[in-house]
Image (cartoon, helix red, strand yellow):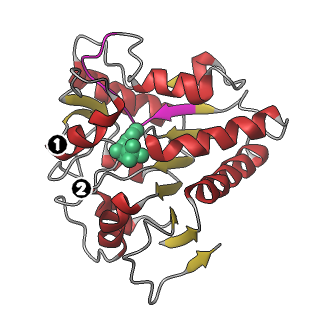
Amino acid sequence: MKLSVFQSADLAANYVCELLVDRIKVFPSSVLGLATGGTTVPLYNALVKSFREGEVSFAQATTFNLDEYIGLPEGHVQSYRCFMNTHLFNIVDIKQCRIHFPDVTAENLSEAGLAYDRLIEDAGSIDFQLLGIGRNGHIGFNEPDASFDAASGIRELSETTRADNQRFFTAGESVPSHALSMSIDQILKARKIVLMATGFRKADALARLFSSQYKLESFPASALIDHHNVEIVCDSEAAINLDLAGHEVVCC
Ligand code: F6R
C-alpha cells in the first residue's frame, strides 16, 4: 500500500482532488466510486473549486456511491444522496442519469443490492474508488464480521458507527439502523482505491490497517491488503500511530 501523509486535512483533500482531476482529464468517461462523510467534505469542496475554475468537467463521468441509509424519508438532509447533491452533484456538470446510489426505495432490498452490483459491472466496474474508514475499520457500511464474500446489500450499522454518525443528525433524531452498501467484494474490483483518513479519531483504525498482515472479517478494511493498487491518504493526526518502517511513504 502506498501512503501519502499531509500536514492537514485540507492538503490531503487537495491531493486526492488532484488525483481525481488528473484521472478525469485523461479518461473523461471514468467510473467513480464515491464516499460520503465528514472526511470527504474538503475533497468535494476542492473538486467544486476545480470545476468552477474550468479545470475539470464531470459531463462524461459515471458515479456509484458506496451506500445509502435505509428508512430515511426521501430528500432527508442526512441521506447520502442529499449530501452528494449539496456538496457536488448540484454544483458540477455531471449528468443525473450517470449518478447511482443503492436503491433504498426498492420493495426487495436484497435484490436491490444485487441489482447495484449488476449496474456497476455493466458500467465496466469502478476505475477509481474513494473510501473513508470507520473507527471500527468499516469501509462502505461493511461493518466488522460481515462476510468479505457477501454481495452488495443490506448491512446493519454497528453501535460505534451509529454513535459516530449521530453528530450529523439533530437531537431527538436517531441514525438509521441499516443501510444498503456496496460490498467489499465489489470495492475490491475497483482498479484503483484511495482511502482517506483524517483526524486523531482515525489514528487507531489507520494504524491497525497499516499493520494488517492478514485479512480479518473482524476488521473490514484489512480486505484491502490484497489489492494491487491502494493508496492511503491521511493527515498527520491520523498518521500519529503509524509504524512506517518498510513502507513507501510520501510526506508533504
Ligand atoms: C460513507 C461511508 C463510510 C464513511 C466512514 C467515515 O459513504 O461509506 O464508510 O467513509 O464512516 O466517515 P467520516 O468521514 O464521517 O468519519
Q: In this view, does 62 lie to the left or right of 234?
A: right
Q: Position of residue 30 (x, y in %)?
A: 65, 40
Residue in the image at 63% along x and 20% along y: 90
Q: Earlier in the sequence, mark 2 or mark 1?
A: 2
Quadrant assignment for the C terminus: bottom right
Q: Residue furthest right?
A: 54
Circle 1 residue: 158
Q: Which residues lie in the magenta part? A: 63-73
What's under tag 2, amino acid-wise?
A: Asn
From the viewer's perspective, is 57 left or right of 83?
A: right
Determine if residue 101 is in view. Answer: no
In the picture of the structure, the residue carrying the numbered disc 2 is: 136
Instruction: Please state the horizontal and vertical placement of residue 214, each as a whole percent of the image.
Output: 25, 73
The structure residue drawn at horizontal position 45% and vertical position 42%, both measured from the top left corner, is 38
From what the image shows, is residue 249 above or below residue 188? below
Pinpoint residue 237: horizontal percent, then vertical percent: 45, 67
